[in-house]
Image (cartoon, rainbow, N blue to C red):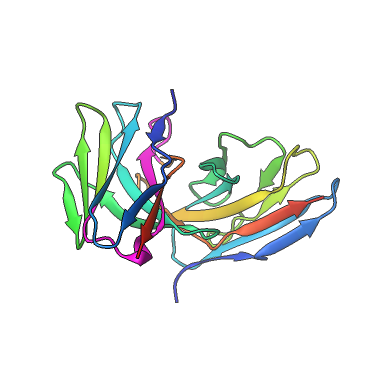
């Protein structure tokens, strides 16, 4: 089983739609969780950290479910510029510095 | 502007040659990392360094070497021993002595023929 698993997609949605991605992680001892965004042929950029109580940043909402070991990202009112690959990231517990990156979920927002 | 720089953006080499990729940060971050990304795949950790003059192997260190002589710099050498060196190489840094988010440089695309 992969340490971090994501549905690769692509998710193809119209502008204005709400879309949600889930990610599961294997190590119950993981403590830190992030969502990154990666545009085609570019570096990943931090979208948001994921806190235990859930957190929101504008149109983006992240949730953590420790009991089921999954993280979600909800995007409301999708924009064309949201088209990208979204990476789920979890800390590795064998080293406090190590982050484990999922392979990403691709989102395509169409006009 | 604070950030991470990598050079060059594109690099072409012949098989059998060693090549060194540059990574510099002016964020005053303690930790630095090297990842490789292959088409359609996730990031895989090559090496990481928590402090100057110290570094650890990641998941795929074979065929690579690093140094950390200065806090700002973490160069990666891809040696001729690396079987499949063609990839997108990403350098990242993070602050402190706990788990923090990592910030990435723009990457170097290495093509070996």
Q: Please, which residue is most extreme toward the top here?
A: A1
A6, B77: nearer the viewer: A6
Q: Which residues are magenta?
A: A75-96
Place residue B41 in its image quadrant: top right
Q: Is residue B30 visible?
A: no
A9, A101: nearer the viewer: A9
- The picture places residue A53, in percent across and down from the top left corner, at 13, 44
| Magenta stretch: includes residue A87 | yes
Q: In the shown orientation, is residue B11 left or right of residue B24?
A: right
Q: Residue at x 32, y 32 (%)?
A: A24
- The picture places residue B99, in percent across and down from the top left corner, at 35, 44
Q: In the shown orientation, is residue B71 left or right of residue A51?
A: right
Place residue A45 in its image quadrant: bottom left
| Magenta stretch: includes residue B30 | no
A68, B79: nearer the viewer: A68
- The picture places residue B34, in percent across and down from the top left corner, at 56, 49
Number of numbered discs: 0
Q: Is residue B16 visible?
A: yes
Q: In the shown orientation, is residue B111 left or right of residue A37?
A: right
Place residue B38 in its image quadrant: top right
- The picture places residue B98, in percent across and down from the top left corner, at 34, 45
The answer to whether B31 is drawn above or below residue A65 in the figure is below
Q: Please, which residue is most extreme toward the left here?
A: A53
Q: Residue at x 43, y 44 (%)?
A: A104
Q: In the shown orientation, is residue B72 left or right of residue A66?
A: right
A81, B84: nearer the viewer: A81
Q: Quadrant of the N terminus of chain B?
A: bottom left
């Amino acid at each position: 089983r992969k340490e971090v698993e994501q549905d690769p997609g692509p998710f193809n949605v119209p502008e204005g739609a709400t879309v949600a991605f889930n990610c599961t992680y294997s190590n119950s001892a993981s403590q830190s969780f992030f969502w990154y965004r990666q545009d085609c042929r570019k570096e990943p950029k931090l979208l948001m950290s994921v806190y235990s109580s859930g957190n929101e940043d504008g149109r983006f909402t992240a949730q953590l479910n420790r009991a089921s070991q999954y993280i979600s990202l909800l995007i409301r009112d999708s924009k064309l510029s949201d088209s990208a690959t979204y990476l789920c990231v979890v800390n590795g517990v064998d080293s406090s510095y190590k982050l484990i990156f999922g392979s990403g979920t691709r989102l395509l927002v169409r006009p | 502007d604070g950030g991470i720089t990598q050079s060059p953006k594109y690099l072409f080499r012949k098989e059998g040659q060693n090549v060194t990729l540059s990574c510099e940060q002016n964020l005053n971050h303690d930790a630095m990392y090297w990842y490789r990304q292959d088409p359609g795949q996730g990031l895989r950790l090559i090496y990481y360094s928590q402090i100057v003059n110290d570094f650890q192997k990641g998941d795929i260190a074979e065929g690579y070497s690093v140094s950390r002589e200065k806090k700002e710099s973490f160069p990666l050498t891809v040696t001729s021993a690396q079987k499949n060196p063609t990839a997108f190489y990403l350098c990242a840094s993070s602050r402190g002595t706990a788990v923090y988010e990592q910030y990435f440089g723009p990457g170097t695309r290495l093509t070996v023929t």
